[in-house]
Image: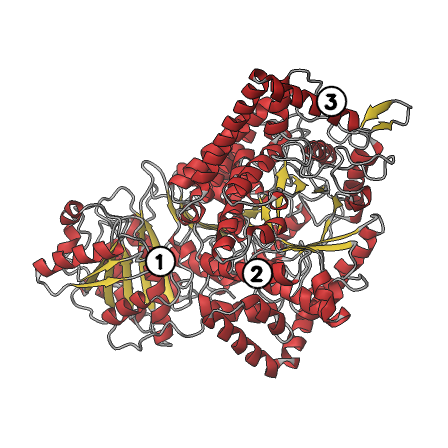
Amino acid sequence: MSELSNIISAVESHHRFVEDQVRRARSDPHVGEELLRRWQQTISAIPNTATPTGLRIPRLALPQLDEPGEIARYIYGEGLPGEFPFVNSAYPQLYTHGNGQAKPANGNGKADDKMEEPTRLFAGLGLAEDTNQRFHYLTGHQRSIRLSTAFDGPTLYGIDSDADGALGKVGEGGVAIDTVEDMLRLYDGFDLGDEHLSVSMTINGPAPAILAMYIAAARRRFGLQVVPRLRGTVQADILKEAQAQNEILFPLDECLRFLGDMVEYTTRHMPRWYPISISGYHIAEAGATPVQQAAYTLSNGFTYAELFRQRGLDVNVFGPRLSFFLDCGLDVEYLVLARVCRKIWAIGMRDVFGAEPKAQLFKLHTQTSGRSLIAREFRNNLTRTAVELLLAYINATNSCHSNSADEPFTTPSEEYVRLAAHAQSIVLEESGLFKHTMNLFGSSPGMRQLESVVEAAILDEFRQIDALGGVLAAVEQRYQRSQIQLAAHRYEQQVHSGARPIVGLNLYRAEFPAPHDMHIVRTPLRKQRAQIARVREFKRRHAKSAGRALDRLEHVVTNGGNVFAELIETVEYCTLGQITARLREIVGCHRPVI
Amino acid sequence: MTNATAPIRVLTAVPLCDGHDSAISSINLELIHHGVEVVYLGYNRSVRDIVRAAIQEDVRAIGISSYNGGHVEFFSAVLAGLRAEGAGDIGVFGGGGGTITPRDAAVMQRRGVDRIFFPGTSLAEIVEYVKIRYGRARRGNRVNGRGGSVDRAVARLITAAEERPNLKSARVIGQRPHSAQHTAGESKTSLVIGITGPGGAGKTTLIDELVLRLIRSNASLRIAILSHDPSVIGSGALLGDRAAMIHSQHDRVFMRSFASRGQAGGVCAATVPCLHILRDIPAHAGVPPFDVILVETVGIGQEAMPFAPDFVDATVLVLSPDYGSRLQLQKIAMLDVADIVVINKSDLSPAMTASAEVQRRLDVNARGQRLVTTCAKRHRDAGVDELFAMLWPGSRRCASREPVAVFP
């Protein structure tokens, strides 16, 4: 049942393959000479670039090797950037956009104008129009338009702002979205069909209904022809919800069915959309170690691939539409975590799922660790985030979000959001570390050592999960959850004992209380009540059509049609809460495992 | 009157629309290792669920871990809910990392929250606080007939019985001497069903699904659940059934979670006195008695027979299909006395074999025992419908096919 044992075998057999190639390179003079020739050719094709002080350095850093065995080990074991198994990078070019007129490093990459800025900023506060305003403010600081959306608690749990007990949480920590009309307000003023615009929505349990609202809103504004041009990501990773984050509305099997319907629809009708972002971030934030984060994220990814394949979807169609999202904290494992993930993913997808190169890529978004930030002397968080950003870029992440220093106690204020964005510019544009040579830090002896230790630990985790019957069986036995809880508890004890030093908390702790003068962003109750009035008015206006729309939805759910396609119609008349309630009647509720 | 050595009981929960259970899970673990009995309600829980559970479980305090904002409103609503039910003596404490600012905390404490823990507080500090603040004998521990809800009165009597299980219920109850005359066999107004089986068979889920059907089958029916979980050797207990029993968090359901406190056999010393209380008190309080009382045991071993003959009206033994070999099956004592045997988790591959083997065993017994196969985790499972119809033959079938709002 579980493909994990096949993945483990594939990684092990890849190791044997690499060692065979090393031996051949050393024992067969023809092979050795060919490798040396190829290596010299690659190195001589690397363009140089000039630093501001006038030094000329190569755009790509490769080890100085004159021994065929080591060349084989690099080429087959790590791969040049953009080459299997993608240890160094998923793409042949990275971060060096706009610096010099150099051609792609190894001659077969994308042109420079396809490169994008990696900076992403996550925003969501108050009502849709408030977040819209924040989006316009943020994109004023960016060359490209990347709207990364956070939702409030009621939205994440699929209930309406007027639900019992929601008052106080409406617009807190994210934007309140109840209806397609809120969605229209949220992205007002942005051209959703523009190829330089992408939208990401961090939502999971109600992801199908929310994406349906997005499509319906875009359709209203730009007509039907906009749908295939829509570009962006919806998180929709329900496995990690069942393991760590707990935003899950229906029984897991039903959630996976709705997800499959959505993936089938978007891969068919929205070729530029990423319908799932397989996320370790929340697993790590819940307390997992870096190795657990990587192992659970990868095994979840392989499980999705297996499920979509079972539905009859082509791995080469859905594979390139999968993307990943990892946490980057201060633990030493983070120096290599993404490098190891890219390798295991590529081997598994190629050798177990038969995927072509573009479906082998572990495309990664990284966010710096929220958990590593603390409220005491919170300005230290600027430094923590800066170090994490360095680690993320050393790992060749494809995009990155840096946390605001004030996040431990509030929705980020504009001041600290701006500082967080600037931190990325300082690392990437001000400093010379990433803009001249794309992989200045890659493949150091320390990295290689760490990589093999981390990789072995990840495979050990795979073995555990496989022994329990695979990811879904392990979830049901609450394996991942209990492991994460144990790790979280151990972390707390280490903080308490001082084994894990945290400046300002258990090291150099100053005896003064947390500052009172910090600027807290809250959504005033007046605004929350306005949203409540708005959703009630929507319900009144659609009272007649809502019931019929929900009945049609129920018909599709019970008769096995594509639920997502129907949801795009349902959201014209129904609120998120109405949809969630009806789906729960039909398929049941998620029963928490503690 | 309160036994000084009785463990402190607290309820912990994460508010509505909030799934951040990492901190509270660590705190739960630390509390139980220091002798506290923690009733854990789980995440995404409403004010009403928290207040109801705290009163029914008669805890000394509620610990709320809130990370998604709205804490001032939420904590205030919990306090108001407790006071409205005459349970203002139940303490409320909490935390939320840095999301609760000192200014918020000041407002919350003015409104009656005992303590907000800020980031950087060690687990040891929290445990210490709980043990000192909520370890004292509580004032006014006599049952007060006025000002409190029925749930409150019942819950306080159960606590008295739990802390002094060896006293006769009459003396525990004190001002209600006539209830001593009642015995288990006398009152037939409540149907008592004992549900037992090994750990991991799915008893909790099955009970919750039965409760859902009971609630829907009749708009006035009242249900009580006595749920048992093991104590950790030499320390407290994590009583987590409520977190998974989503349908049972309902105003017509009275649920009480017991820690075994060292008692072997599947129930605890207070179970029988508590059954008496549940049968008698609602009538005294002028409300209809519980129609159904469900007793869930701790996960039991092969030899256990947790229910004395006139303890319950019917017994249900729940087994998972992976009980092992036929030889193992022969050793399960409850198979000879259970009225109904349930093979749950029918989606597992050995389910067919298990049903056949158990049926053969029941045929040999020739006592009219019945067998049903269920998959309780499945929504509207036909097997659970069948079990429901066996237990309550008069009820409408397929009662599960009606809307219910589980979460607000």
Vertical relation: A439 (above or below) A584: above
- Residues tagged by mark 3 and mark 2 found on one chain of the structure: yes
Q: Residues within 10 Å of mark 2 (few under 14, many from 20)?
A: many
Q: Nearer the viewer, mark 2 or mark 1?
A: 2
Q: Is residue B72 visible?
A: yes
Which residue is label 2 attached to? A264
Q: Give the tally of numbered discs.
A: 3
Q: Residue at x 66, y 67 (%)?
A: A213
Kindly report the distance in space between the C-alpha atoms of the residues bearing marks 3 and 1. Answer: 66 Å
- Residues tagged by mark 3 and mark 1 found on one chain of the structure: no
Q: Residues within 10 Å of mark 3 (few under 14, many from 20)?
A: some
Helix, strand, or loop for circle 2? helix
Amino acid type, callout 2: Glu
Report x, y in % for residue A583: 50, 68
Which residue is label 3 attached to? A40
Amino acid type, callout 1: Thr
Residue nearest the observer in this picture, B282 or B31: B31
Would you say the residues marked 3 and 2 are in contact, meaning their CB atoms lie under 8 Å apart? no
Q: Earlier in the sequence, mark 3 or mark 2?
A: 3
Q: Nearer the viewer, mark 3 or mark 2?
A: 3
Report x, y in % for residue A481: 46, 44
Vertical relation: A431 (above or below) A195: above
Helix, strand, or loop for circle 1? helix
Q: Residue at x 50, y 53 (%)?
A: A309
Residue nearest the observer in this picture, A492 or A524: A492
Q: Nearer the viewer, mark 3 or mark 1?
A: 3
Kindly report the distance in space between the C-alpha atoms of the residues bearing marks 2 and 1. Answer: 33 Å
Amino acid type, callout 3: Gln
